[in-house]
Image (tube, helix red, strand yellow):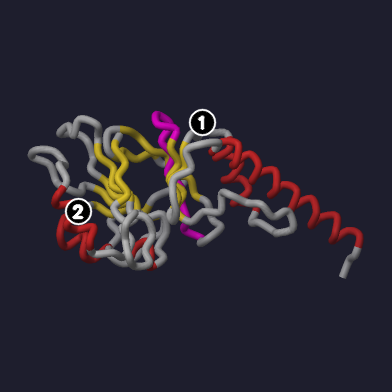
Amino acid sequence: MKIINLTDDSDIYTSNAYFLLGDWKAVDDVNALIDVGRDPSIIDKIKELDTGVGKKRVDRVVLTHAHYDHAALLPIVKAEFAPEVYSFHPFDGVSHALRDGQTLKLADTWFEVIHTPSHTSDSICLYCAEEGALFSGDASLIITATDASYQENFVGSLERIARRDIRAIYPGHGSPIIHGAKRLIYKSLDNVRKSKIAKTLTDSRWPE
C-alpha cells in the first residue's frame, strides 16, 4: 500500500488528506481518500498521480468524522471523481454509514473500523492489520493527563486499539508516528485508567 499525504505542504488550515493506492495499482484495488480536508489543491494533485489504467481516480472516501477541516472539500471531490463516501454518521453527501467493527477494502488491503467517541461522537479510527497502520483522525490517542474524565465507550475503544499490532499512526493533523507507536498507546491507556481511578477516589473521599 502506498500512502500519500496530499496536504502535507498546504498553506491553509486543513486536516491531513491521505490518498491510498495499491502497490501495483491493480484493477481490483480501491483508490481511496481518508479525509478530504479543505484545500482545493488536492484535486490537481490527484489528477497528476498515476492511479492505474482503466480505474476511477478515487473509488472511495472515508471520513474520520464530520468536522469542516476534515470534510469541507467533499462536494468538490464528489463532483470531480464521483466516489462512494463512507462515514460513521450519515450526513449530506455520504453514501454509506459505517459501523464499529466493519471491514472495508482500501487500496490493496483491508481495514477495520474502530469507533472512538472522544473528539466527536462520530469519530473513527481505521486499522490495517497487514501494514500495522492506524489512521486516527482526531481521536485522542496520545494522552498525558491523569486527572481527566473519559467516556466509558472511548476507554473500551482505546483498549481494543492497544490490543492491535500498531506500528505506525497517521493522525488527522501533524506528522506520522512511526517509532514507538505501540508504546505510546499503552502509556495513554495507562493514563486513562489512572484518571478513572483518581476520579473514583476523589468522589468517595469528598462527596458533594
Going by the numbered disc 1, the residue's amino acid type is: Asp
Secondary structure, mark 2, is helix
153 horizontally vs 206: left or right:
left
5 horizontally vs 101: left or right:
left
180 horizontally vs 56: left or right:
right
Q: Which residue is mark 1?
A: 165
Indicate which disc residue 45 carries. 2
Secondary structure, mark 1, is loop
Q: Is residue 119 magenta?
A: no
Seen as rendered, the residue at the extreme right is 205
Q: Work out whether mark 2 precedes mark 1 in sequence or the reverse, and give the earlier one.
A: 2
- Which quadrant holds the N terminus? top left
Seen as rendered, the residue at the extreme bottom is 208
Which range of residues does the magenta coloring cover? Answer: 121-132
Residue displayed at 9% across by 38% down: 53
Q: Is residue 127 magenta?
A: yes
Residue displayed at 64% across by 46% down: 188
110 horizontally vs 194: left or right:
left
**What is the spatial separation of the Cα atoms under label 2 and label 1, in whole angstroms?**
32 Å
Going by the numbered disc 2, the residue's amino acid type is: Lys
Q: State the image quarter where residue 206 is shown.
A: bottom right
- Residue 33 x/y as whole percent: 29, 50
Figure check: 27 above or below 192:
above
